[in-house]
Image: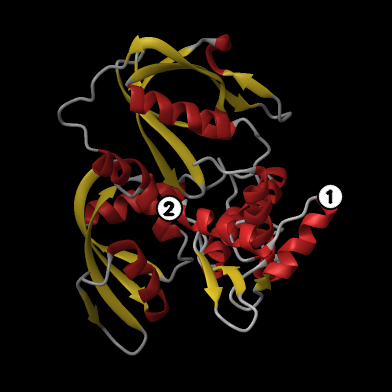
Amino acid sequence: MALTNRTLIILRFLWANTDERHPVSLADISAHFEQFNMTADPRTLRKDIEQLVEFGIDIVKDRRVQNLYHVASRHFEAPEVKLLIDAVQSARFVTPKKSKELVKRLAAFVAPHDTALLKRQLYIDSRAKATNESIYLSVDRIQTAITEQKRIAFLYFDYSPSKERIHRHDGQVYSVSPYALLWNNDTYYLVGFHDYRKQVAKFRVDRIDNIEISDEIAVCKPEDFDVSEYFVQEFSMLNGKECKVKLICENTLMNSIIDRFGESVPTQMLDGNHFSVEVTVDLSNNFYGWVFASAGKMKIVEPAEAVAGFRRVLNSFDEK
């Protein structure tokens, strides 16, 4: 049975105005119809509400002298929408304009009298937000291409010292077989097979321009390619020679060590202020930069190869 305009008006009214604490009567619904120059008797309204329930709308009837109705369950509860709104507001890749649009849409998923709880501002205004509105289109097309196993074509740009977008290789069109989208440090990355370089490569999605889905079938993933391993290789401290190192750290760095290596990492208390830890890392600039960021609270003590590598990095900062 098709829904009538009258039934849809009832649905919109109940959805926008009711929850468990704010039910309405048939008289309230009938009064709402006056603005549309329509009338409906209680018997007709009850049948319309029954029809909405048959269509899957969770409308609860509170049996009293005058029956009251409200929408009981929605897509999300208010605490869940709060988490989503916080994520939208804090995500750097979401532009300020798009953040406001998404928050407004998310508010429609909660009970009408809970929307005031969502109107709060996180303390993130000092963080840089993206300005590239096309990122949403890029993400959508990449996901579509992955699903359809098609190649994508796009331009890739860098910023010049004057903040102008300069397309790489004089505007050469990149042809890539997309395998996955990765999320790291508030940034989307496309991972796929680069036709020109003949290898798997990653690209920042916010630096992609004019993306199009090609008619060409994507190159199949290499048999030894694993997305999880690739993520660790590219975004952790794993792009140099693998080595087991011993670190001596101040006690205040225990949180940082556990965040990086997990709670099972082997540590040993040395005195009231220091502990040692042995971990396996790659001797890379990423690893040395992480140690440097401790501002002297962490020291590499073994092996000599790692100590010498860190000193070389420090010496590179000396004025020539």
Label disc, if present, on residue 289 of the rendered structure: 2
The chosen color scheme is: secondary structure
Whether 191 is drawn above or below 98: the answer is above
Whether 181 is drawn above or below 128: the answer is above
User: What residue is pinned by disc 1?
Assistant: 37
Q: Residue furthest bottom?
A: 272
Real-space Cα separation, disc 2 to disc 1, in angstroms: 71 Å
Q: Residue 163, percent across and down?
A: 71, 30
Give the amino acid at mark 2.
Gly
Which residue corresponds to the image point at 49% horizontal and 33% vertical from the top-left? 139
Q: Earlier in the sequence, mark 2 or mark 1?
A: 1
Q: Residue 17, percent across and down?
A: 69, 65
Give the amino acid at mark 1.
Asn
Q: Nearer the viewer, residue 83 or 179?
A: 83
Which residue corresponds to the image point at 54% horizontal and 72% vertical from the top-left? 61
Provide the secondary structure element on which disc 2 rests. helix
**Is 212 on the left-hand or right-hand side of 151?**
right
Which residue corresponds to the image point at 33% horizontal and 81% vertical from the top-left? 274
Provide the secondary structure element on which disc 1 rests. loop
> Could one spot residue 24 in this view of the protein?
yes
